[in-house]
Image (cartoon, grey):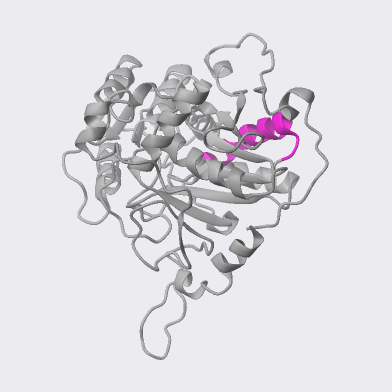
């Protein structure tokens, strides 16, 4: 991890006070898009970190639908400006839920019908909400043999695009507008906190981790970016498995993931995220879903192990409402074995992304694109770039601690 230095702070008095959330009076919203952005930050400390330590959580659940209201609006606006999306054209996209809310909002603002392709794992309450917002929800019935539910959804999107003239797909996994949509979020964080040493982001499509880190690195060249994934996700070179957690992780390799930006990655298991979500709820009132629990677990550990003056920002993508039947439901959690003992105080450590299959909280300090393949060695076996990046990675970072 990049060493954290004691940098003069330029934050205002509110953001410099670790007991105060950064809340600024906002002007009245001008139409529906004015409801998006300018979300508050909250200092999170005990019990995830010791008294006097902690991290700053950017509460994106204060957007009407969550963090993906930002790319939902931005991708549609850019497509309309280029002429890719014609007036009245149908928006068709794959979603696990949150982007669907953003696209439903964008469709309402700009007058586009919206079809959202999802899978049986989407919460019934979310389906009902998307329908209430005017979206048409299309559910695939079988996962793709290798690409899982995500590839099955994308295949269905391709089919639907051929059936609707003037339709358009945002392609959130590969659309660069998905990353540039987060420039305002990065600038909000910079204004609220004044300086940031470490940024912690969940990773799904790769949009917000790439977009926010790109801007913040221009402001703070020494910024450390920590990615948070779920066990069973293939984004960072692990084998794809069926996953309970939605909103982070993937069974495909989104090209928006900025692998070169990451200093390390952590994988978190569902039970560990549930425990952290509930701790947040009981201690800070502000909590959220799977991504929030996973990010908070990692950010809390960083707050415990980095120098006390390190300023850590963590992005909480949503709030708790859609998870009342999963994360916050005792019967659901008991049925899935999620009410276990608290997470270990420290993550496991592996030296390369494909060293072993991880099943609990684990970190790796050698992050590369798993699709990048090194030259074939003399023994004829292909070696991933991850396997070639072992030397010095995690071991050096442990010394930096």
Q: Does residue 215 appear left or right of residue 121 in this picture? A: right
- Residue drawn at point x = 48 percent, y = 52 percent: 346
Compared with 32, 202 (above or below) is below
Q: Is residue 72 placed above or below 196 in the rendered structure?
A: above
Tell me if I can see residue 352 in this picture: yes
Residue 200 spot, x, y in % from top left:
56, 44
Question: Quick check: can you spot residue 168?
Answer: no
- Number of callouts in the render? 0
Of residues 385 and 349, which is closer to you in this image? 349
How far from the left and from the top, in percent, is residue 214? 64, 47
Residue at image point 40% right, 61% down? 237
Where is residue 15? Give x, y as percent: 72, 27
Residue lying farthest bottom?
378
Image quadrant holding the C terminus, namely bottom right
In this rendered view, identify the residue nearer to me: 228 or 310.
310
Which quarter of the rendered picture does the N terminus lie within?
bottom right
Name the residue rendered at 27%, 42% in the picture.
Answer: 153
Q: Is residue 133 above or below residue 294?
A: above
Residue stretch in magenta: 175-195
Which quadrant of the structure image shows residue 382? bottom left
Q: Give percent across and percent down for residue 45.
A: 59, 33
Q: Main secondary structure of the magenta part?
A: helix
**Residue 371 higher or lower than 315, as above or below:** below
Does residue 368 belong to the magenta stretch? Answer: no
- The residue furthest left is 141
Q: Is residue 176 magenta?
A: yes
Q: Nearer the viewer, residue 172 or 165?
A: 172
* Residue occupying image coordinates x 49% and y 51%: 257
Res 30 quadrant in image:
top right
Q: Nearer the viewer, residue 376 or 302?
A: 302
């Amino acid at each position: 991890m990049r060493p954290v230095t004691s940098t003069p702070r330029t934050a205002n008095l509110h953001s410099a006070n670790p007991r105060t959330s950064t809340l600024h009076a906002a002007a009245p919203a001008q139409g529906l898009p004015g409801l998006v952005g300018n979300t508050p930050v909250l200092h999170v400390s005990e019990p995830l970190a010791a008294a006097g330590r902690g991290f700053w959580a950017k509460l994106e659940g204060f957007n009407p639908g969550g963090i993906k209201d930002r790319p939902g609006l931005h991708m549609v606006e850019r497509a309309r400006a280029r002429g890719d999306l014609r007036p009245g054209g149908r928006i068709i996209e794959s979603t696990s839920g949150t982007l669907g809310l953003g696209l439903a909002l964008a469709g309402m603002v700009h007058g586009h019908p919206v079809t959202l392709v999802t899978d049986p794992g989407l919460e019934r309450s979310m389906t009902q909400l998307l329908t209430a917002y005017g979206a048409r929800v299309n559910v695939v019935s079988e996962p793709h043999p290798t690409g899982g539910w995500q590839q099955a959804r994308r295949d269905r999107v391709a089919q639907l695009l051929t059936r609707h003239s003037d339709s358009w797909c945002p392609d959130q996994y590969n659309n660069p507008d998905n990353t540039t949509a987060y420039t305002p979020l990065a600038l909000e964080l910079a204004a609220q906190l004044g300086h940031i040493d470490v940024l912690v982001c969940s990773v799904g499509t790769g949009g917000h981790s790439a977009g926010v880190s790109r801007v913040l690195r221009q402001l703070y060249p020494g910024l450390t970016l920590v990615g948070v994934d779920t066990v069973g996700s293939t984004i960072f070179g692990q084998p794809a498995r069926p996953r309970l957690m939605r909103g982070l992780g993937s069974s495909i390799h989104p090209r928006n993931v900025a692998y070169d930006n990451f200093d390390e990655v952590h994988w978190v298991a569902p039970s560990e995220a549930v425990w952290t979500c509930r701790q947040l709820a009981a201690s800070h009132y502000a909590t959220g879903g799977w991504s929030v629990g996973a990010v908070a677990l990692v950010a809390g550990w960083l707050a415990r192990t980095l120098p006390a003056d390190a300023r850590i920002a963590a992005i909480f993508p949503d709030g708790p409402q859609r998870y009342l039947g999963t994360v916050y439901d005792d019967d659901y959690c008991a049925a899935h074995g999620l009410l276990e003992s608290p997470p270990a105080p420290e993550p496991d450590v592996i030296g390369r992304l494909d060293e072993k299959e991880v099943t609990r909280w684990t970190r790796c300090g050698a992050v590369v694109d798993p699709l990048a393949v090194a030259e074939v060695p003399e023994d004829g076996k292909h070696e991933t770039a991850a396997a070639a990046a072992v030397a010095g990675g995690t071991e050096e970072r442990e010394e930096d601690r």
